[in-house]
Image (spheres, helix red, strand yellow):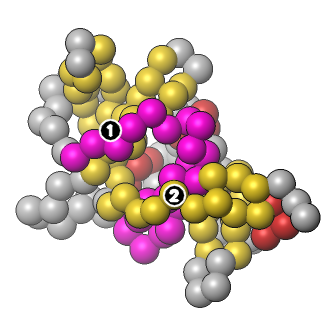
Amino acid sequence: MGNKKQLCTFILDNLFCGLEVQRVQEVLRFRELTAVPLAPPEVKGLINLRGQIVTAIDLRRRFGLDPLPDGRLPMKIVAKAKDGIVSFLVDDIQDVLELDDESFEPPPEPLEARIKDLVQGVYKLDKKLLLLLDADRLLEIDCMADA
């Protein structure tokens, strides 16, 4: 029997994604953001989280996806990064899943290069693939190809 990994899962457009639970601090409903002049387009703004200033990264923008339709507000996953915490804006939060390492595979070839670069690998589930995202790589805004 292989090792198990717990993942906080979420939806991003038509992608089913996950982050390792130990990287996730909390999940929040959308709050107003303070814009950051001259920031890269992926940096949606800043939030004040109980006195701590947190950068909000728009994962739709990071993945090169269209913005959420008007009227829909993103959810926030507050995650631990090397230098503090960061907030990832996602479409919807799903469940925490415990998955066996035996079902883990490298990213498939058909994945778009911009997305594949942000994915550690995939878990094959019954009717879909779960993309395990690399939280540190998501923060490397300057590595994103021009949109």
Looking at numbered disc 2 in the image, what kind of residue is underneath it? Val
**Residue shown at 69% from the left, 63% from the top:** 99
Q: Secondary structure at mark 2?
A: strand
Tell me where residue 112 appears, x and y as whole percent: 60, 66
In the image as oriented, which residue stretches furthest toward the bottom? 127
Q: Is residue 120 above or below residue 85?
A: below
For residue 41, which numbered disc appears in the image?
1
> What is the quadrant of residue 12 in the picture?
bottom left
- The answer to if 12 sits in the magenta stretch is yes
Q: Quadrant of residue 52?
A: top left
- Which residues, given as a range, are shown in magenta? 7-29
Where is 104 relative to 44, above or below?
below
Image x and y of residue 104, in percent = 78, 64
Residue underneath mark 2:
96
Q: Residues within 10 Å of mark 2 (few under 14, many from 20)?
A: some
Which one is nearer the viewer's eye here, 144 or 128?
128
User: Residue 125 lies in magenta, yes or no?
Assistant: no
